Image: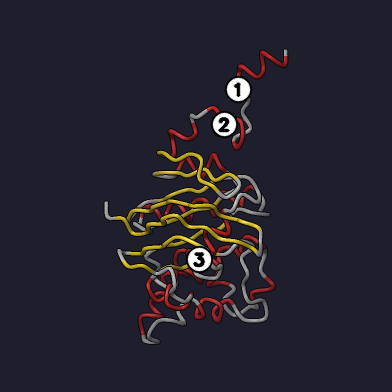
Amino acid sequence: MTTLLRIEGLSSHYGRIQALDSIDLEVRAGELVALIGANGAGKSTLLRCISGVQPMSAGHIRFEGSDISRMQPKGRVKAGICQVPEGRQVFGPMSVAENLALGAFCRKQDESVAVDMDTVYSMLPVLHQKRHLAAGTLSGGQQQMLAMGRALMGRPRLLLLDEPSMGLAPLIVQEIFGIIQRLRTQGTTILLVEQNAHFALSVADRGYVIETGRITLTGAGRELIARPEVQAAYLGMQDPADSEQIG
């Protein structure tokens, strides 16, 4: 498959604190790639670097073969990199429909925008039901769907999903996961950061494990699930050898 996104030697700092250290990562067209790691490992920082809202201190980001390392965030959205941020970050006072329209702000405002909005409503019917309501009145799960719909309005070539299940009830999480799987089957290329490591790796073509700003493991999603160190650290499974020592 064609490499859509290639990251080479990416580092990033918050002041003197190094958040990312020489990250190498790639996403191929049509893939769902999962990025897992503990809180504070640098997952969200990496997505923010890709979307251009977090400065890089070293390295390169190439998208469809072009170096976009110095491109402004708006240019990256125009190129087709659309992010669903952690915590949803919808515009509360604005209506659901207005939030969705903002997702297409970089596009030519023609009839295709209305067509895409209808497509989002078809995929996420609760948004159509509540399209005239202020986004701030929606439940957490509905706001997550709105944030995803807003990103889809940008016609993403690469969809960045940052912790889409965070803070949601289990039944709503299942619904969100169903939407992600549907997008995958439709051919959307996705880079997924997700606290539910088992789900993320079970649906991912490939996965990366990040620890303290460095990639420590990579491989097919199912292969990473089977790794004892991944099971112990992220899947709540204890290494049998450790159990014997404890006993």
Seen in the image, is 110 located left or right of residue 161? left
Tell me the number on the disc at residue 15: none
Q: Position of residue 216 (x, y in %)?
A: 51, 40
Q: Amino acid at mark 3?
A: Gln
Q: Which residue is disc 1 drawn over?
A: 239
Extreme-left residue of the structure: 1
Residue 30 found in image quarter: bottom left
* Cβ–Cβ under 8 Å for marks 3 and 1: no
Nearer the observer, 241 or 114 = 241
Q: Amino acid at mark 2?
A: Gln
Extreme-right residue of the structure: 247
Residue shown at 54% from the left, 68% from the top: 55
Residue shown at 44% from the left, 73% from the top: 70
Seen in the image, is 176 located left or right of residue 61? right
Which element carries disc 2, helix, strand or loop? helix
Q: Which residue is disc 2 drawn over?
A: 231
Work out whether mark 3 precedes mark 2 in sequence or the reverse, and give the earlier one.
Answer: 3
Residue shown at 41% from the left, 44% from the top: 206
Work out whether mark 3 precedes mark 1 in sequence or the reverse, and give the earlier one.
Answer: 3
Q: Which residue is disc 3 drawn over?
A: 83
Q: Position of residue 42 (x, y in %)?
A: 59, 53
Rounded to the nearest angstrom, the CA distance separating label 3 from label 2 is: 28 Å
Rounded to the nearest angstrom, the CA distance separating label 3 from label 1 is: 36 Å
